[in-house]
Image (cartoon, helix red, strand yellow):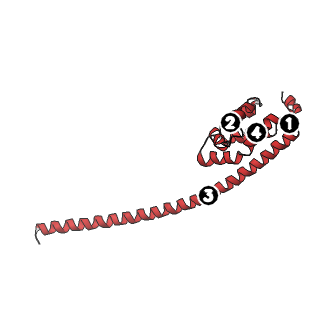
Amino acid sequence: MDYSDMLIFASFAALVLLLIFFGLKVQNLQKQLQLCQNSLKATSRRMSDANGSMVVLAQQIQSFLAERLDASHKRGLVNAKHYETLQPMFEKISAVSVYCMEKGMSVEEALNAALQDGEVTLEQICEVIKVQPSDIRMAWSKNTLDGFIIACRGLSFPPTKTESSKAE
């Protein structure tokens, strides 16, 4: 066996070792990929369940706040003009919540999308907000879902005149 044969054999052995190394590396990467895919599927299922629960919760909040707005209007706590402006928005609380949570929209964008049927405009709603107490205006101005829900809660059951005078 001469020097060139030994060199060829050593090269061949090195290539076989590299092939084994990369084969094991690929096998390990395939296992990691499979684990990631399984984790992604489980996370997707959990997200789907959470989205379904969030929609149900948003519908319950919408129903509760709309009932409170109706009751406040019947008791004379919300005047007819404000009620006519706010009522269509209260019917869309669930849609606004879904737009904000799933699509990452701001409340303003979500309201514009939800109120496309033209019953009321965002500008009309903002005019009603302008005459509300500062806590409602501050919550509304955040332009976030939590601020929107807080503002709707305040709009649906405004303080009575005696409650307003006690706060001052």
Q: Which residue is mark 4?
A: 86
**The quadrant where residue 9 appears:** bottom left
Front residue of 104/86: it is 86
The secondary element bearing badge 1 is classed as loop
Asked if 138 appears above or below 53 in the picture, the reply is: above
The residue type indicated by label 2 comes to Leu
Q: Are marks 1 and 4 in contact (CB under 8 Å)?
A: no
Q: Which residue is mark 2?
A: 122
Dot in front, 3 or 1: 1
Alpha-carbon distance for marks 2 and 4?
Answer: 10 Å
Q: For the point 71% across and 33% down, which residue is it? A: 124
Front residue of 121/162: it is 121
Q: Which residue is mark 3?
A: 48
Q: Residue furthest toward the front?
A: 118
Q: Few, some or many C-alpha atoms within 10 Å of disc 2 (few <14, some 14-19, many ≥20)? A: some
Residue 148: image x %, image y %?
A: 70, 40
Q: Which residue is mark 1?
A: 77
The secondary element bearing badge 3 is classed as helix
Residue 18: image x %, image y %?
A: 29, 64
N-terminal of the pair, mark 2 or mark 1, is: 1
N-terminal of the pair, mark 2 or mark 3, is: 3
The residue type indicated by label 4 comes to Leu
